[in-house]
Amino acid sequence: MEDNKTMTGATEAGTSGAEVGAVGLDIGTSRIVMAGGPNGHRAKSQLNAFVGVPYSKMTESILQQNKMVYHRDGKELFVFGNDSERFASFFNAVPRRPMQHGVLNPQEPMGQQIIQAIIETVVPKSRSNELLCFSVPGKGEGADTNLVYHEAVLKNFLSTLGYESKAINEGLAVVFAELQNENFTGIGISCGGGMCNVCVAFLSVPMLTFSIPLGGDYIDSSVASVVDEPLTRVRLIKEESLDLSRQPKDKISSALHIYYEEVINTLVDKLREEFENSRHLPKLDRAIPVILSGGTAKPRGFLQKFEAAIKSGGFPIQISDVRLASDPLTATARGCFIAAMSEVR
Ligand SMILES: Nc1ncnc2c1ncn2[C@@H]1O[C@H](COP(=O)(O)OP(=O)(O)O)[C@@H](O)[C@H]1O
Ligand SMILES: [Mg+2]
C-alpha cells in the first residue's frame, strides 16, 4: 500500500539535485523503506519479513504465477517482503524476521541473505558510487555492542551494490525530515515495531540519542498473551481500528490501551532521565518541538497520550508543541534522503 507513494518533503529537498541520485534507506525491524534515488523521489517499502517452505517445482511455479518475490536456498523457498504476509496467512504461519530490536537478529540464520534480497528490491542500481544514508538505532537495551556489527554488515553489502554509505541515527533522520523550519532543532522520535528511537538535536547536531526495546511488536505479543488471541488478529485490530482517544470497549482494545500506555510512559520517563543525567546539553533559550513518527505512532489519540505523559510529572525542558510527522511511515527514509542530499550537493 505504501509503494510508490509521492513524497512531499523529499520532493522539495530533492528537486535541485534530481540528477545526483542520493538515496535514503530506513532499515527498520518491521519495514525497509527507500526514499529518493534518481527516478522521481518516491518512497518504496517492503515488509522486513519472510516465510520459508520446502522447495518443490510445484510450489515454485505457483509463486511465479502469483508474481511473488522469493529466494531459493537449496531445499527451501523463501517468500519475502510484502508478499510474506499473504503467504503466511495461507499457511497459518508467523513470518520470520531478519532483524530484532533494531539490529540483525543473531538467532535467525537466514537473516542476512533475506535482508539483502529485500534491500535489492527497493534500492535503485547505483550508477557511480552514489551516497546512500541508512538509518541505525541509538544505543539502548537490545541494541548495544551488536550495533557495530549490524552497521558494518550493511555497509559492506551496500558497497557491493555500488553505494558509498553512511549510517545515520533514526531519531536524527526524523528531525531532518520534519524540522527544516526550526533549523533542525528539536526532538525526533520514531516508534516502530521493534523499538522506539529518540534524538535530541540542536542545529542538526545530535546531542542525545537513545533507544528503548519496546514498540509495536511488544504491544502485539503482550496483548495476544493476556487475552489469549492469535498475534496476527491482535495486530490487525490494532492497525485497523484502535482509537486511543476513546474509552476501550472490549477486552482486546482495553489491553491495547494498557500496553500503549506502558510504552509511552517508559519512553517519556527515559527521556526525562536522559535529560536530567546529561551534562552536555547546550542552554536552551526557547521551547523546542517534538516530532512523533513510525507505525506505532499512527493510532488516533497517540499524540494526546504522549502530550499527557509529558505534562504529568513535569519535564526538565520546555516543549513548544508535539506533532505527528506528515507521513509517519516514511519520515525516517525521507530524513535519510535529506541527509544524503545535503552531503552530495
Ligand atoms: N495504523 C497503524 N496503527 C497502529 N500500529 C501500526 C499501524 N501501522 C503500522 N503499525 C505498527 O507499526 C509497527 C511498524 O512500524 P515501522 O515504523 O514500520 O517500524 P520499524 O521501524 O520497526 O520498521 C508495527 O508494530 C505495526 O504493527
Ligand atoms: Mg523505524
Image (cartoon, rainbow, N blue to C red):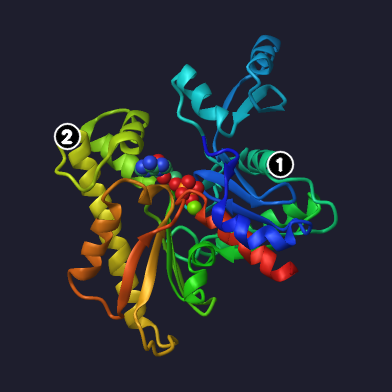
Q: Secondary structure at mark 2?
A: helix
Dividing the image into four quarters, tell me where ligand 1 lies.
top left
Q: Name the amino acid type tagged 2.
A: Lys
Percent from the top left, x then y, of residue 314?
A: 21, 75
Percent from the top left, x then y, of residue 296?
A: 38, 48
Against 49, residue 230 (above or below) is above
Q: Is residue 15 left or right of residue 87?
A: right
| Residue denoted by label 1 | 120
Is disc 2 surrounded by few (<14), some (14 to 19) or many (20+) residues within 10 Å? Answer: few
Image quadrant assignment for residue 239? top left
Percent from the top left, x then y, of residue 312?
A: 17, 69
Image quadrant assignment for residue 342? bottom right
Residue in front for this viewpoint, 97 or 133: 133
Q: Is residue 158 left or right of residue 85?
A: right
Residue in front for this viewpoint, 178 or 275: 178
Query: Residue at the spot x=65%, y=24% of the render?
Result: 77
Q: Residue furthest top?
A: 58
| Residue denoted by label 2 | 251
Against 271, residue 163 (above or below) is above
Residue in front for this viewpoint, 13 or 236: 13
Q: Name the amino acid type tagged 1.
A: Glu
Quick one: quadrant of the C terminus? Answer: bottom right
Is disc 1 surrounded by few (<14), some (14 to 19) or many (20+) residues within 10 Å? Answer: few
Q: Secondary structure at mark 1?
A: helix
Can you see residue 111?
yes
How many angstroms separate mark 1 from mark 2 (CA)?
A: 41 Å
Against 18, residue 50 (above or below) is above
Query: Residue at the spot x=61%, y=59% of the render?
Result: 12
Q: Is mark 2 within 8 Å of ligand 1?
A: no
Q: Earlier in the sequence, mark 1 or mark 2?
A: 1
